[in-house]
Amino acid sequence: TETQGLVIGEAKAVGLPVVAIRAFGPAEMVAHGEDGLLTDPSITAFAEAIITLLSDRDLYEAMSAKALENVNSISSAYCAEQMLAVYRELLDRGASAPRRRFSFNGRFLNNKNGSASSMFYRYADRYRLLH
């Protein structure tokens, strides 16, 4: 596996079904049985999935077509749009939304300065300036 997850998108973009271990990341990017196969984290399970895919031409071709169809749902542009939609929703709520306290390693983060949440406020301010 790779830490950035680019290889899954690259494979799907050229119509290659993906075989990956069912873990955070690949499990969100591969539709099991549709555009690839997700396996348990064992060499045997991984090898069996590869053999299954390579020994069944119809399955391979169906998953190949689905990979091309589904690749846009994991593109950087699509993910950026989804993230912007979340930010827009939060900004639209503005001051009318109840303030929540977020905990990180036991510390509450709910102020606009000196905490991890200050990063959100900086980006929110930049967003307001741009839109």
Image: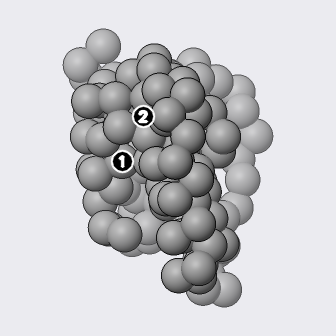
Quadrant that contains the N terminus:
bottom left
Q: Mark 1 vs mark 2: which is more N-terminal? A: 1
Secondary structure of the residue carrying numbered label 1:
helix
> Residue most toward the bottom?
106
Q: Are marks 1 and 2 in contact (CB under 8 Å)?
A: yes
Question: Where residue 90 sits: x, y (%)?
Answer: 58, 30
Residue 1 in the image: above or below residue 67: below
Taking the spot 36% from the left edge, 47% from the top edge, the residue there is 8
Q: Residue at x 66, y 40 (%)?
A: 33
102 or 77: nearer the eye? Answer: 77
Indicate the position of residue 24 as horizontal and vertical percent values. Answer: 56, 63
Could you tell me residue 103's position as x and y percent? Answer: 66, 73
Asked which colour scheme the image uses, the reply is one colour
Residue 116: % across, % down: 44, 67
Q: Nearer the viewer, residue 64 or 123?
A: 64
Label 2 amino acid? Ile
Q: Is residue 126 left or right of 29 when viewed as pictured?
A: left
Name the residue rendered at 53%, 82% in the picture: 43
Q: Is 105 positioned to the left or the right of 70 in the image?
A: right
The mark tally for this picture is 2
User: Label 1 amino acid?
Assistant: Ile
Where disc 2 sits, the SS reads helix
Instruction: Name the residue carrying label 1.
Output: 8
Tell me if I can see residue 109 in this picture: no
Name the quadrant containing residue 41.
bottom right
Disc 2 crowd rating (10 Å Cα; few below 14, some 14-19, many 20+) is some
Depth check: give the residue in front, 19 or 123.
Answer: 19
Q: Crowding at label 1, few (<14), some or many (≥20) Cα neighbours within 10 Å?
A: many
Residue placed under numbered mark 2 in the picture: 74
The answer to whether residue 117 of the structure is visible from this angle is: yes
